[in-house]
Amino acid sequence: MASGAEQTVSEYIVHHLTNLTYGKLPAGFERQTADGVQVVGDGGEWTLAHGADEIAAMGFNAIHVDSMIWSVGLGIIFCWLFRRVAKTATAGVPSGWVNAAEMIVEFIDGTVKDTFHGRNPLIAPLALTIFVWVFLMNLMDLIPVDLIPHGLMLVGVDYQKIVPSTDPNITMGMAVGVFVLMLYYSIKVKGFGFVKELTLNPFNHPLFIPVNLFMEVVGLLAKPFSLGLRLFGNMYAGEMIFILIASLFSVGLFWMLPAALLQIGWAIFHILVITLQAFIFMVLTIVYLSMAHEDH
């Protein structure tokens, strides 16, 4: 286990589900340290959290450092890989990374043409970015759950979640970005027609404007929530299963072989989940932006 043999299974699970968090502890907060109880002075203290109680005390201003580093890092890897492919691509028969990149681009381009019914040069690059980026974040789930956290604990980093898509802050952040684009193109393409769409649908009568507005606003707000929480829920559940299976290794020698077989089996099945969730996030983004471009 990542945090030592003295942990119970419950503590092990909680430890793996805790983010490396940086935030401001309020004045008067009592921290448990190796030297005893330390009281935070006036003005508070910006620091890394050591435990769930400190994370809760930091409140909304806390930052999940591990999620930010891994998501940005994977985004940089995506840009570097595709830039390298673009520089090495030739008119001849592609091979290796070039072939794989061309297959991904052609697949996504075909999906955009079949799904998006407007004309916007941003949609295809956006869809490519979303699919590959979310896929890379999901792919981190296949790394053994104890490998990186245990290695970082040796250098003093207590907590580390390496799968950004198991953090609702990351998935909802991307969903909010898509939502902003939906609103922007709805206003740009439809103009005042967007207001009519919200107030005169589905009942085309002035008396039903409050009812229409309530129904349409709820439906509009449900899109980013469904987009972000669907990805988070599926990846969080998959990560939880990996952690539960890993906890079997501490039970005894009898469970080591079944646990290893379960890990391999779940990892093979999870490859499908990883790819499918990236594809669903991409397709729903295209569909929502297509709806924003439809001017009735």
Image (cartoon, rainbow, N blue to C red):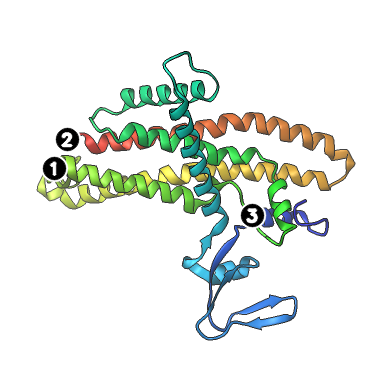
- Using residue 270 as the reference point, say whether residue 264 is left or right of it: right
Q: Which residue is labeled 1 in the image?
A: 193
Which mark, residue 160?
3
From this viewpoint, which residue is outermost toward the right?
253
Kind of residue sitting beneath label 3: Gln
- Using residue 185 as the reference point, say whether residue 37 is left or right of it: right
> Which mark sits nearer the N-terminus, 3 or 1?
3
- Residue 90 lies, with reference to residue 201, above or below; the image says above
Kind of residue sitting beneath label 2: Asp
Residue contact between numbered discs 2 and 1, judged by CB atoms under 8 Å: yes
State the CA–CA distance, disc 3 to disc 2: 46 Å
Q: Secondary structure at mark 1?
A: helix
Q: Please say whether residue 123 is visible from this viewpoint.
A: yes
Quarter holding the C terminus is top left
Residue 268: x, y in percent?
Answer: 65, 29
Q: Which residue is labeled 2 in the image?
A: 295
Residue 128: x, y in percent?
Answer: 41, 33
> Which mark sits nearer the N-terminus, 2 or 1?
1
Residue sitting at x 55%, y 34%: 274
Q: Secondary structure at mark 2?
A: loop
